[in-house]
Image (spheres, rainbow, N blue to C red):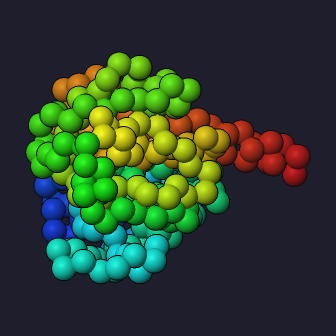
Amino acid sequence: MTRPLIGVTTSSRSGWRIFPLVAANIWLAGGRAVRWGAGRPADVAAIDGIIIGGGDDISPDLYGGEIVASARLDPARDALERRLVGEAMDQGKPVLGICRGSQMLNVALGGTLDQDAYATFTGSRFYKTILPRKSVRVLPGTRLMDIAGPEVMKVNALHTQAVARLGDGLRVAARDQGQMIQAIERFSDPFALGVQWHPEHLIYAHRQRAIFRALVAAAAAGRRRENQIEAAERAAA
C-alpha cells in the first residue's frame, strides 16, 4: 500500500517555511504530505487525513467573540479550514490540529476560544518560544496518553489564545500547570486530536513524533476500510 496522503493547511505568511518541517514529520511517520491553503485545491475525498496547521488568529465572528486590536486574521483560511474539519468528520477522515489548528478543530465543532488566555489562567506561565519550556500534564484515559504516555511533557508555546468551551464530541486531553487547556480530542471515531503546541519543531522527541504516527496510522486504517468496502461492493455487483 502506498503511503497515506495527508493534506496540510498552512499560513499564507509562514507556510513556506513550516510546511517542509511538517512534511518531514509526516514522512518519518510513514505518510506523505500535500500543502493546502486558500486558493489551492483542497478535496477531502482525495486524501487520507488532515493536519490543520498553526499561524493566524481565528476570527471571533466564528464563535461569538470580539475583535481585538492585536489579531492577525485570514478569513479565507478560516472558511477553508472550517469546511475541511466538517467534511473530514462527515467522511471519517482523521484530523490533527496544531496550535491554531487545535483551536479551529474546537471552533468548527461548535466550541469557543478564550482570546486572552493568560489573563484568565494567571497560574499558567507565558512562553513564546519553539523550545520545550512549558510543562503539560496529559490526562488519564485519553487517546493522547495512549499515544504519548503518562509522563509530564515538555513542549513549546507560541499561543496567547486557548480553547474555552469545548466543541461537540470533544474532551480535554492535556492541561498546563495553570489548568489552561493544552490538548483536546474526540472521544469517538473519526480520530481527531488538537495540541496547543508545535510538535513539528520537536522532531527529535519520540513522544512528539508519536503524535504524527498516530495520525498516519489512523489515515492508513481508514484507507484500508475504504478499500475493503469498495472490494465488497464490486464482488456484490
Residue drawn at x 50%, y 58% is 165
Residue 189 in sight from this viewpoint? yes
Question: Which of 122 and 225 lies nearest the eye of the viewer?
Answer: 122
Residue drawn at x 30%, y 35% is 177
Question: Which of 184 and 164 lies nearest the eye of the viewer?
Answer: 164
Image location (x, y in percent) of residue 76? 35, 79
Image location (x, y in percent) of residue 128? 12, 49
Image location (x, y in percent) of residue 131? 12, 37
Q: Please give the count of numbered marks on the rendered protein.
A: 0
Residue drawn at x 36%, y 41% is 179
Residue 24 in sight from this viewpoint? no
Residue drawn at x 30%, y 80% is 67
Question: Which of 140 and 91 lies nearest the eye of the viewer?
Answer: 140
Image location (x, y in percent) of residue 147? 45, 26
Farthest residue to the right: give it: 236
Residue 45, placed above or below residue 98: below
Residue 233, placed above or below residue 54: above
Say left or right for 36 vs 19.
right
Say left or right for 153 vs 70.
right
Residue 108, placed above or below residue 131: below
Question: Which of 2 and 200 lies nearest the eye of the viewer?
Answer: 200
